[in-house]
Image: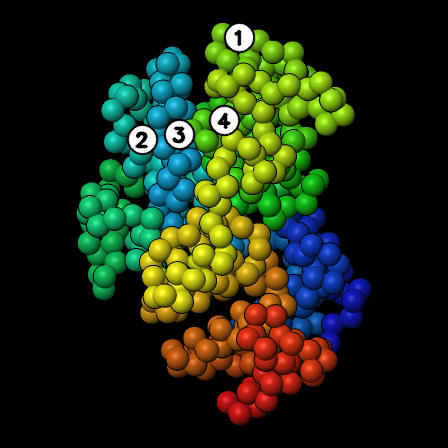
């Protein structure tokens, strides 16, 4: 359709509209947000076979369910797999579940907010179903997401190898039944324990009664929200959680919780959150089971006499997890080591280290992961991580270039044409002699020449 150049004021309206209705920030600054909005319009224009100016009007004016179903795959990231982040899941099984079993016998209710295609809620059901604690009151897992197409896949419970990269063959046999063409379906007893529904965390009221939910998993979701939307979502979580409830977020999101009405709890080297039972948010809480402290759980940056809590169930949350002196520096994978392993052909070890950084907001981490996947012949994995890189940085030229190469190898003419257009526009906006980041010394002019020779 039309390739007209959208005006900055039109792009700003789109950016505001998406942030206002979905809470999603399209870019870290106004220029990146406009670039992402322009890509969104261009992709929708191509896929819906409609003029770009019509797409702009449609996004700004529409708010019905059909609109949400169509646009949600373009503004959300569906990066997930079974048994993702074993350390967090181990703490859920070994520490959080026992604390809930001690409560009056009623169903334990767990909410996976932003569940994408369902791998997380099914994982939680598998853990709870197999628990040796004797969950006398039973349990129920609820998965919600904005993307209706993802929910349709979740309800079917049918998955391919890309969703099993956190599992071994024994676990796959234990939790899944073979399906067609190399796919597997979640066993019936786990599917029956999980319900799925659509929900906009920002625009919709919480679907639960006050205090109804025991645990909320919301990982790698709030990092895409602006401050106001994040505050609104957390207020909804606070309303939904029981006073003894738990909130689980991604490691890279813990610093976003500092102004919330939740306090941090460290279990097994991981940080979880629980609701304050009274105002103000910075009230005292036990530093050890049965003990009390009158210090702020977040610490006091201006108090030179501040002392850390004694080691126990509760510990202060470090401002920067990588700077926490209690964590050995060796636990943080080194990018240089990943490169070295990949160069030596130790791709499985290199991939393992990359996946341990999967929560990173650095687009290069996901680009590097995609290169390793390509070396291993896993093009689905490569495409997924490249999309994650482009979500974080829509102007990442080499990520577009890699997707173009995959489209060519797969004979996908439509995707090939799309990536050629995207690349040409990005490269024409750069000085010809400018070196393309991560392009092994290639300039914008070099890549344009390569495009023209395709």
Q: Is mark 2 on a helix, strand or loop?
A: helix
Judging by the rendered image, the residue that carries numbered circle 1 is 291
Comparing 325 with 277, the one in front is: 325
Q: Which mark is residue 91?
A: 3
Distance from Cα at disc 1 to Cα at disc 2: 30 Å
Name the element at disc 1.
loop
How far from the left and from the top, in percent, is residue 42? 62, 72
Q: Earlier in the sequence, mark 3 or mark 2?
A: 3
For marks 4 and 2, give the CA distance. Answer: 21 Å
State yes or no: discs 3 and 2 in contact (Cβ < 8 Å): no
Name the quadrant containing residue 36: bottom right
Q: What element carries label 4?
A: strand
Q: Which of marks 3 and 2 is in front?
A: 3
Q: How far apart are marks 3 and 4 (CA)?
A: 10 Å
The residue nearer to you, when weighing 101 against 139, is 101
- Sequence-first disc among 1 and 2: 2
Q: How far apart are marks 3 and 2 (CA)?
A: 13 Å
**First in sequence: mark 1 or mark 3?**
3
Q: Name the residue under label 2.
A: 128
Residue at image point 65% right, 31% down: 258
């Amino acid at each position: 359709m039309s390739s007209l150049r959208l005006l900055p004021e039109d792009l700003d309206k789109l950016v505001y509209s998406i942030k206002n209705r979905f809470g999603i920030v399209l870019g870290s600054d106004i220029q990146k947000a406009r670039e992402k909005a322009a890509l969104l319009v261009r992709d929708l224009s191509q896929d819906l076979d409609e003029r770009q100016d019509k797409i702009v009007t449609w996004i700004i004016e529409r708010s019905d369910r059909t609109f949400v179903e169509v646009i949600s795959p373009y503004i959300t990231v569906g990066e997930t797999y079974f048994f993702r982040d074993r350390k967090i899941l181990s703490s859920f099984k070994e520490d959080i579940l026992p604390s809930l079993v001690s409560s009056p016998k009623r169903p334990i209710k767990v909410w996976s907010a932003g569940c994408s295609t369902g791998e997380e809620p099914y994982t939680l059901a598998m853990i709870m179903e197999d628990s040796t604690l004797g969950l006398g009151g039973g349990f129920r897992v609820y998965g919600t997401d904005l993307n209706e197409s993802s929910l349709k896949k979740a309800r079917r419970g049918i998955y391919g190898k890309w969703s099993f990269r956190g599992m071994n063959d024994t676990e796959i046999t234990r939790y899944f039944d073979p399906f067609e063409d190399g796919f597997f379906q979640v066993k019936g007893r786990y599917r029956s324990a999980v319900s799925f529904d659509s929900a906009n965390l920002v625009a919709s009221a919480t679907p639960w009664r006050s205090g109804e939910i025991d645990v909320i998993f919301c990982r790698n979701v709030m990092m895409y929200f602006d401050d106001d939307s994040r505050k609104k979502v957390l207020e909804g979580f606070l309303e939904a959680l029981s006073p003894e409830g738990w909130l689980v977020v991604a490691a890279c999101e813990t610093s976003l919780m500092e102004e919330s009405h939740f306090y941090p709890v460290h279990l097994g080297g991981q940080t979880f959150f629980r609701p304050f039972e009274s105002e103000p948010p910075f009230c005292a809480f036990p530093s050890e089971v049965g003990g009390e402290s009158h210090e702020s759980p977040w610490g006091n940056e201006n108090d030179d006499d501040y002392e850390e809590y004694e080691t126990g169930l509760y510990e202060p949350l470090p401002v920067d997890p990588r700077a926490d002196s209690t964590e050995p520096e060796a636990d943080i994978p080194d990018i240089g080591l990943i490169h070295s392993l990949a160069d030596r052909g130790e791709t499985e070890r290199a991939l393992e280290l990359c996946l341990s950084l999967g929560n990173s907001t650095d687009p290069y981490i996901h680009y590097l992961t995609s290169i390793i996947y390509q070396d291993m012949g896993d093009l689905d994995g490569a495409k997924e991580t490249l999309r994650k890189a482009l979500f974080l940085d829509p102007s990442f030229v080499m990520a577009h270039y890699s997707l173009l190469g995959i489209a060519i190898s797969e004979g996908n003419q439509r995707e090939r044409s799309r990536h050629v257009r995207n690349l040409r526009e990005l490269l024409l906006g750069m000085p010809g002699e400018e070196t393309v980041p991560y392009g092994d010394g290639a300039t914008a002019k070099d890549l344009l020449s390569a495009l023209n020779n395709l």
